[in-house]
Amino acid sequence: MNQMGTRRKYTDEFKAEAIRLASQQDSSIQGIADDLGINSGMLRRWIKTANGVPSTQKNMADAELNKELVRLRRENAKLKTERDIIKKALVDSNGQSNSFTKILICMGTFDETSKTNIYSR
C-alpha cells in the first residue's frame, strides 16, 4: 500500500493503454480507473494531456462540428433539389434538350467538346 506523501510512477505504456481502454465506447472512465487501481481524475488528466485539448473545449468543438454538418447536409439537399429542377427545365416534353441548345447546335455555334458557345463572324 502507498503511504501518504509517496507517489507511484506510471510508465508511458501504462498510461497509453489506460487512455486506449478509456476511449472505447463501452467503457466508463471511472470503471477503467477502478480496474487499473488508479484515481479517475488522474486518468482524465492523462486523456486531456494526450488529446492536447481540455475536454470542455473538445466537447464544444464537437458540438460546433455537428452543427456545421447539419447545415452542410441541409445545403446539400437544397442544392440537389435546385439541380434537379434545372435538369427538368432543360428537357422538354419529348425528352429532348432545351430548344435553345438545339438551335445553337443546328446553327453550328455550339461546340459540343468544350460546351461553349462559338460565335461565327
Image (cartoon, rainbow, N blue to C red):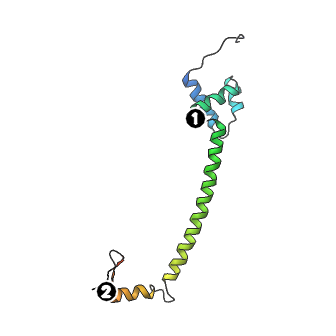
**CA neighbours of label 2 inside 10 A, class few (<14), some (14 to 19), many (20+):** some
Mark 1 or mark 2, which is nearer to you? Answer: 2
Quadrant including the N terminus: top right
In depth, the one of 17 and 96 nearer the eye is: 96
Q: As drawn, which residue projects farthest toward the front?
A: 121
Kind of residue at badge 2: Gly
In depth, the one of 88 and 117 nearer the eye is: 117
Q: Where 98 falls versus 81 (above or below)? A: below
Q: Quadrant of residue 99?
A: bottom left
Residue that badge 1 annotates: 51
Q: Quadrant of residue 77?
A: bottom right
Q: Position of residue 7 (x, y in %)?
A: 65, 14
Residue that badge 2 annotates: 108
Q: Residue at x 71, y 26 (%)?
A: 34
Q: Where 96 falls versus 42 (above or below)? A: below
Q: How many marks?
A: 2
Residue 10 vs residue 32: left or right? left
Kind of residue at badge 1: Asn
Q: Position of residue 93 (x, y in %)?
A: 51, 89
**CA neighbours of label 1 inside 10 A, class few (<14), some (14 to 19), many (20+):** few
Q: CA distance from mark 1 to mark 2?
A: 62 Å
Q: State which tag comes first along the sequence, 1 or 2.
A: 1
Q: Residue at x 33, y 89 (%)?
A: 107
Q: Where 76 falls versus 94 (above or below)? A: above
Label 1: element kind? helix
Q: Quadrant of residue 24?
A: top right
Q: Residue at x 69, y 27 (%)?
A: 41
